[in-house]
């Protein structure tokens, strides 16, 4: 069986479509590089950092609501 790049890309895209939700984030000019740089300093990808920031904020907000 030969490796078919188009099939591999389609498989990956289908998997992502079925497994993940997409969010389009808009930020001011220059913020993307600031956020990306900070994420790299933390050893994270941009996506990983944004997800962590969201999850930590949700957790913190939920803790406030329980008090």
Image (cartoon, rainbow, N blue to C red):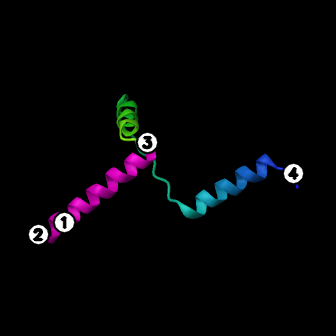
Query: Marks 4 and 2: in contact by CB < 8 Å?
Result: no
> Quadrant of residue 44 in the image?
top left
Q: Secondary structure at mark 4?
A: loop
If you read the primary sequence from the N terminus, does the residue marked by circle 3 or circle 2 appear first?
Answer: 3
Can you give x and y, in whole percent of width and height, for residue 62 in the image?
Answer: 22, 66
Q: Main secondary structure of the magenta part?
A: helix
Q: Would residue 51 appear left or right of 5 to someone viewing this image?
A: left
Q: Secondary structure at mark 3?
A: helix
Q: Would residue 35 appear left or right of 59 to someone viewing this image?
A: right
Can you give x and y, in whole percent of width and height, for residue 50 in the image?
Answer: 38, 48
Q: CA distance from mark 1 to mark 4?
A: 53 Å
24 relative to 15, above or below? above
Query: Marks 2 and 1: in contact by CB < 8 Å?
Result: yes
Q: CA distance from mark 1 to mark 2?
A: 7 Å
Q: Which residue is mark 2?
A: 67
- The residue located at (50%, 59%) in the rendering is 21
Answer few, some or many: residues within 10 Å of disc 3's Cα (few below 14, many 20 plus, some between 14 and 19). Answer: some
- The residue located at (11%, 69%) in the rendering is 67
Q: CA distance from mark 3 to mark 2?
A: 32 Å
Can you give x and y, in whole percent of width and height, for residue 57 in the image?
Answer: 26, 55
Q: Which residue is mark 3?
A: 46
Which numbered tag is attached to residue 63? 1
If you read the primary sequence from the N terminus, does the residue marked by circle 1 or circle 4 appear first?
Answer: 4
Q: Which residue is mark 4?
A: 2
Camera-near label (4 vs 3) is 4
Query: Marks 4 and 1: in contact by CB < 8 Å?
Result: no
Q: Which region is colored magenta?
A: 45-66
- The residue located at (78%, 46%) in the rendering is 5
Q: CA distance from mark 3 to mark 1?
A: 26 Å
As for residue 12 lying within the magenta part, the answer is no
């Amino acid at each position: 069986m030969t490796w078919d790049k188009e099939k591999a890309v389609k498989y990956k895209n289908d998997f992502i479509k079925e497994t993940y939700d997409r969010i389009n984030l808009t930020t001011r000019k220059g913020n993307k590089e600031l956020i990306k740089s900070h994420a790299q300093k933390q050893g994270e990808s941009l996506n990983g950092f944004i997800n962590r920031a969201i999850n930590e904020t949700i957790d913190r907000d939920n803790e406030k609501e329980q008090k």
